[in-house]
Amino acid sequence: MSEQDAIALTRALLRFETVNPPGRERDCARHAGALLERWGYRVEYHEYAEARTSVIARAGGSPAKAPLCLTGHLDVVPLGARAWTRDPFAGETQGDRLYGRGASDMKAGVAAMLLASRNISKKISNTPGIVLVLTAAEEGGCIGSYHLAQTQLLGSAGAMIVGEPTANYPYVGHKGSLKFYAGFRGTSAHGSMPELGENAIYKAARAVSRLEAFDFAQPEHPVMGRPTMNVGTFEGGQGVNMVPDAARIGVDIRTLPGMDHQALLAKIGKLLGEETKLDVFSDMPAVWTSPEEEWVQGVFEICRRHLGAQPEPRTAAYNTDAGNLLKVYRGAPTVVLGPGEPQLAHQTDEYCSMERIRQAVALYEEVIRRWCGI
Ligand SMILES: [Zn+2]
């Protein structure tokens, strides 16, 4: 079967159109699940909404040690406004490049995890085993993993690999994210008589100034640096001849490990005033494992042999499902490691290096073998 090959399997996954929104991961999820079942895995599906399907697959298992989790997402971002020069869903190749929406982010990573799982499938019984978690709806808020973490399906895991694009460089975490809208109310009046109204845009503008000067009072993290805040949207007003009675700003905060999001929101609420309404729509904790941690050192060692250089502690710029999965796999050391090219994620003419996909299969396989002692 051609899908025994990493490139062919990546291409097969690319051909399932899982653009989110709307998502529709079901067919892709069923395809991956059917392969895993054929290889002897115990497969379960979870749909938090129609056709928004995640896969949980297990093999092995031991009372002495929890399994290793490998996780990736099945959805991809929209194609964007610019025209592609390649078919985004055909898996065209040129040289070492395999093109397609999701090639780097992250169907190559999912394919490599699947093949590594197949390669060890005959030796994994009577070992701690692995659990594969393939999620729906990661893009735009990690909704699929949020729902999975509310179920009993995840079970336990003692360590976790997230196959997001890192060009096979092991990252030891990423910042958290806290996104919210702040709403401001005023009183409408005719634009020629502003003294009769209360201008909501002025209130929002004053709030933006305060946020620009916001001090997190947070010491710098040795690898991640400082937390950040960005006001990304500003909306308000219905006509230039009216005093606006409503305005809204959208705020994106990236946090460091250990920062308390609730305390941060309380501080911002106080700064903006009691009448300001904060509407949080994304709340993901930071993910961080010390590079000195024993299992991480083992992953570094495996990567060193493949990359030809000792990895330095680095963290990813983006968010991952790990923030949600760690609510269940509490304290599990976590590494982000995948074959995709991070700078190509979400780009027009996205591609992945085929050599890196093959390399990722070998990396994952070694990490699994080491965890399971095979
Ligand atoms: Zn991704």
Image (cartoon, helix red, strand yellow):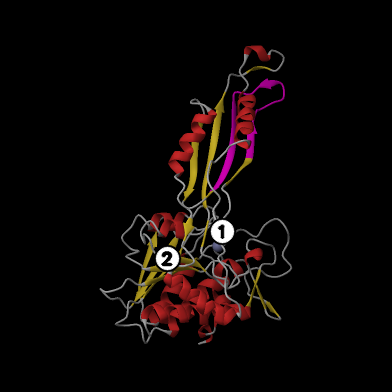
Find numbered disc 2 in the image and state the secondary structure of the residue it sits on. loop
Please name the residue that numbered disc 2 is placed on: 333
Q: Does the magenta-highlighted stretch encompass residue 141?
A: no
In the rendered structure, the answer to whether residue 14 lies left or right of residue 99 reads left
Which amino acid, by three-letter code, is at mark 1? Val
Instruction: Tell me, yes or no, if residue 44 can be seen here.
Output: yes
**Could you tell me residue 61's position as x and y percent?**
30, 76
Question: Which of the two marks, 1 or 2, is nearer to us in this view?
Answer: 1
For the residue pair 270 and 275, the one nearer the viewer reads as 270
The answer to which quarter of the image holds residue 293 is bottom left
The image shows residue 155 at horizontal and vertical percentages of 32, 65
Question: Residue sitting at 36 percent across and 81 percent down?
Answer: 40
Circle 1 residues within 10 Å: few <14, some 14–19, many ≥20: some
Give the residue at x 69% y 67%. 349
Q: Which corner quadrant holds the C terminus?
A: bottom left
Note whether 143 is above or below 275 in the view shown.
below
Element at label 1: loop
Residue type (three-letter) at the residue carrying disc 2: Pro
Image side of residue 29 versus residue 40, left or right: right
Residue 201 locus on image (x, y percent): 64, 27
- Observer-nearest of 27 and 104: 104
Provide the major secondary structure of the magenta segment. strand
Determine the CA span between mark 1 and mark 2.
16 Å
Question: Which residue corresponds to mark 1?
Answer: 223
Sooner in the amino-acid sequence: mark 1 or mark 2? 1
The magenta span reads 233-254
